């Protein structure tokens, strides 16, 4: 059963990556940050890379990564919460948990359309 969830997630992620690539309204930098998050997505549509890891993936400065994350938050493409425990291991840590459930259940164009209304 768990294996089927991963396959379904992979298909949805592939579909969303295609939508991101084809979207003309989303800034290029935002696309790179979102792709970095999607490649780390887990079965519950969450991931928790550090800002530094996203910087490494995208070659952007910290302030630029934060700016792009805020763009995604403002449009309800992702939600983030500060955590002090790793969701997987329950060990102490500090960082953000990024929830991409909205993007996994709704098309990118639908989310962006709702934001412009």
Image (spheres, rainbow, N blue to C red):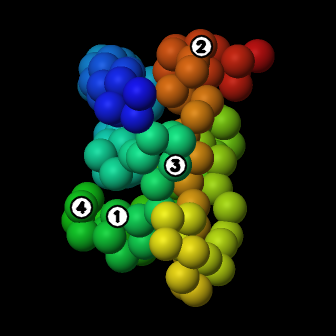
The kind of secondary structure element at disc 3 is strand
Tell me the residue that label 4 is attached to: 57
Q: Which of 110 and 40 is in front in this view?
A: 40
Seen from the viewer's position, the closer of residues 54 and 92 is: 92
Q: Are marks 4 and 1 in contact (CB under 8 Å)?
A: yes
Q: Do the residues labelled 1 and 2 touch (CB within 8 Å)?
A: no
The residues bearing labels 4 and 1 have C-alpha atoms spaced at a distance of: 5 Å
**Mark 2: few, some, or many residues within 10 Å (few <14, many ≥20)?**
few
Q: Name the residue under label 1.
A: 54
Q: Residue most toward the front?
A: 1
**Label 3 to label 4, Cα distance in Å?**
18 Å
Q: Which of the two discs, 3 and 2, sits closer to the camera? A: 3
Q: Residue at x 68, y 43 (%)?
A: 74
Up the image or down, 42 lies above or below 83; here it is: above
The residue nearer to you, when weighing 11 against 6, is 6
Question: Does dot 2 land on a helix, a strand or a loop?
Answer: helix
Determine which residue is flagged by label 2.
110
């Amino acid at each position: 059963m768990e294996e089927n969830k991963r396959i379904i997630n992979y298909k949805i992620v592939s579909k969303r990556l295609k939508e991101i690539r084809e979207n003309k309204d989303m800034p290029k930098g935002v696309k790179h940050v979102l792709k970095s998050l999607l490649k780390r997505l887990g079965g519950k549509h969450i991931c928790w890379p550090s800002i530094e890891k996203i910087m490494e993936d995208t070659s952007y400065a910290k302030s630029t990564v934060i700016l792009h994350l805020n763009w995604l938050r403002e449009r309800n493409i992702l939600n983030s919460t500060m955590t002090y425990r790793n969701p997987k291991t329950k060990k102490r840590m500090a960082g953000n948990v990024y929830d991409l459930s909205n993007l996994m259940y709704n098309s990118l164009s639908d989310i962006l359309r709702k934001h412009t209304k």
